[in-house]
C-alpha cells in the first residue's frame, strides 16, 4: 500500500485548480477554514458557490485522514480528487469524485449540494479574498 505522496498531491491539486478555473471558479490551495482545518483546494465562483476538494494521493492517505467530514459545513460542494489508478470504490457515495493529474481533471461523480450557513459564507468569502490578495502580494513582492 503506497504511503501519502506530497509530490503526487501537488500535481493533483494543480490539475484540479486548472479544471475549476476553466469552470469559472477562483481556486486556492492549502486554505485555512474557520474550524482550524485546512482545505487542500477551495474554489469560489461568481455566485459565491464554494467547492472544497480533498486530495488523496494514495489509499493510505485516504484511510488515515478522516478529518474530511469537518470540511463539509464550509462548502456547497465537496469532492475527493484522486489519480486515475486510485481504488475509487472506497470514496463515499455521498461525496463528489474527481479524477485528476497535473494537467487537468474530470468530475466522475458530482457532489450533492450542501447549503452553507450565510454568515459562515460571508466570513469565508472575506478570508478567501484576503488570503488571495496576500498570496499575490508575496508573489509579486517576495521581499515583503
Image (spheres, helix red, strand yellow):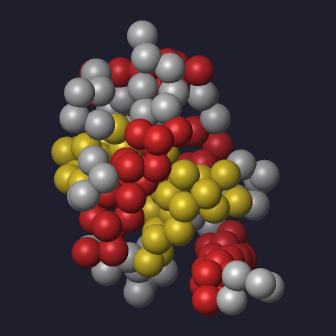
Pinpoint residue 79: horizontal percent, then vertical percent. Answer: 40, 48
Please indicate, yes or no, whether residue 93 appears anywhere in the rendered image: yes
The residue at 60%/49% (across/down) is 71
The residue at 70%/59% (across/down) is 33
Please indicate, yes or no, whether residue 126 appears anywhere in the rendered image: no
- How many marks are shown on the rendered structure? 0
Q: Which of 134 and 119 is in front in this view?
A: 134
Q: Which of 61 and 103 is in front in this view?
A: 103
Q: Nearer the viewer, residue 103 or 131?
A: 103
Q: Is residue 38 above or below residue 44?
A: above
Q: Quadrant of residue 120?
A: bottom right
The residue at 70%/82% (across/down) is 142
Quarter in which the C terminus is drawn: bottom right
Q: Quadrant of residue 55?
A: top left
Pinpoint residue 49: horizontal percent, then vertical percent. Answer: 44, 73
Relative horizontal placement of residue 122, taking residue 63 as reference (left or right)? right
Residue located farthest toward the top when viewing the structure as drawn: 1
Q: In this view, does 109 lie above or below 14?
A: above
Quarter in which the N terminus is drawn: top left
The residue at 42%/84% (across/down) is 47
Amino acid at each position: 500500500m503506497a504511503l501519502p505522496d506530497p509530490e503526487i498531491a501537488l500535481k493533483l491539486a494543480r490539475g484540479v485548480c486548472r479544471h475549476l478555473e476553466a469552470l469559472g471558479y477562483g481556486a486556492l490551495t492549502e486554505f485555512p477554514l474557520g474550524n482550524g482545518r485546512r482545505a487542500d483546494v477551495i474554489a469560489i465562483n461568481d455566485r459565491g458557490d464554494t467547492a472544497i476538494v480533498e486530495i488523496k494521493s494514495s489509499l493510505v492517505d485516504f484511510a488515515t485522514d478522516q478529518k474530511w467530514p469537518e470540511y463539509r459545513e464550509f462548502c456547497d460542494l465537496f469532492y475527493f480528487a484522486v489519480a486515475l489508478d486510485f481504488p475509487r470504490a472506497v470514496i463515499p457515495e455521498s461525496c463528489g469524485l474527481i479524477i485528476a493529474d497535473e494537467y487537468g481533471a474530470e468530475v466522475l461523480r458530482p457532489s450533492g449540494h450542501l447549503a452553507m450557513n450565510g454568515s459562515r459564507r460571508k466570513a469565508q468569502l472575506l478570508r478567501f479574498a484576503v488570503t488571495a490578495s496576500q498570496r499575490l502580494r508575496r508573489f509579486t513582492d517576495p521581499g515583503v
